[in-house]
């Protein structure tokens, strides 16, 4: 499934396998195997491919089985004013390497001209789980609030422990990661601005 998405975006951007391979440091043979779904890319490989294609990594991590159908709020003229996303049908992004599932609480509409300027997501962290396999650096600024449980936010060489109701702001380009240190689930809601599509 991911292979088809990679291939379609590569072709849309006008890159050959050799072009993309040269941009990201992988062989054309390896990329061909990914595109044919003969191999599964690591999260790190997906990050490099996303950078090489100038495409947000969420494009490759969307769960193909989500029930959320973005056509009405994303394609209608009224989207500039509102969009309802039911809690039972949020679009999801899955990071299988670390068992993390993000549920988007803002529309994710990469194929339409009307796109939200911010990206919001709901994340239920399992006990001892991280939101990413390593420190994350991104251009959008981010704000996080803890809805349930507690989380540790790693920024630079510091660790900040947040309990229910606490929030945290992270400026653009600051390396960070979030962990649930407890033996029970934690829930966070985060917003990023501007949204990366």
Image (spheres, rainbow, N blue to C red):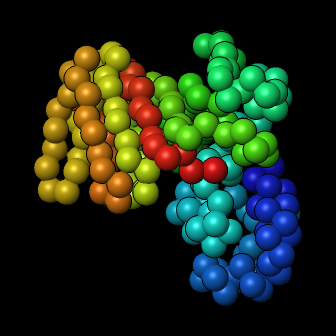
Left or right of 44, for residue 65: right
Residue at 55% from the left image edge and 57% from the top image edge? 43
Residue at 67% from the left image edge and 29% from the top image edge? 80
Left or right of 85, for residue 18: right
| Quarter where residue 72 is shown | top right
Q: Is residue 40 above or below residue 88?
A: below
* Residue 120: percent from left, percent from top: 51, 32
* Residue 35: percent from left, percent from top: 81, 64
Q: Is residue 193 above or below residue 128?
A: below
Residue at 19% from the left image edge and 57% from the top image edge? 156
| Quarter where residue 103 is shown | top right
* Residue 151: percent from left, percent from top: 27, 30
* Residue 95: percent from left, percent from top: 56, 43
Left or right of 136, for residue 64: right
Q: Is residue 64 above or below residue 46?
A: above
Could one spot residue 72 in this view of the protein? Answer: yes
Could one spot residue 128 in this view of the protein? Answer: no
């Amino acid at each position: 499934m991911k292979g088809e998405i990679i291939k379609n975006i590569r072709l849309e951007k006008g890159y050959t396998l050799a072009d993309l391979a040269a941009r990201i440091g992988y062989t054309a043979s390896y990329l061909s195997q990914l595109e044919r779904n003969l191999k599964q890319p690591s999260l790190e490989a997906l990050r490099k491919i996303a950078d090489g294609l100038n495409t947000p990594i969420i494009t490759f991590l969307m769960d193909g089985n989500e029930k959320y159908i973005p056509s009405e709020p994303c394609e209608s003229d009224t989207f500039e004013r509102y969009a309802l996303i039911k809690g039972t049908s949020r679009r999801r992004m899955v990071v299988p390497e670390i068992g993390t599932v993000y549920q988007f609480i803002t529309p994710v509409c990469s194929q339409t001209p009307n796109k939200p300027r911010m990206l919001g997501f709901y994340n239920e962290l399992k006990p001892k789980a991280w939101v990413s396999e390593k420190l994350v650096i991104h251009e959008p600024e981010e704000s996080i609030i803890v809805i349930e449980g507690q989380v540790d936010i790693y920024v630079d060489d510091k660790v900040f422990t947040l309990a229910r109701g606490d929030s945290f702001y992270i400026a653009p380009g600051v390396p960070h990661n979030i962990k649930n240190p407890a033996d029970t689930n934690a829930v966070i809601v985060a917003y990023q601005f501007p949204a990366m599509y």
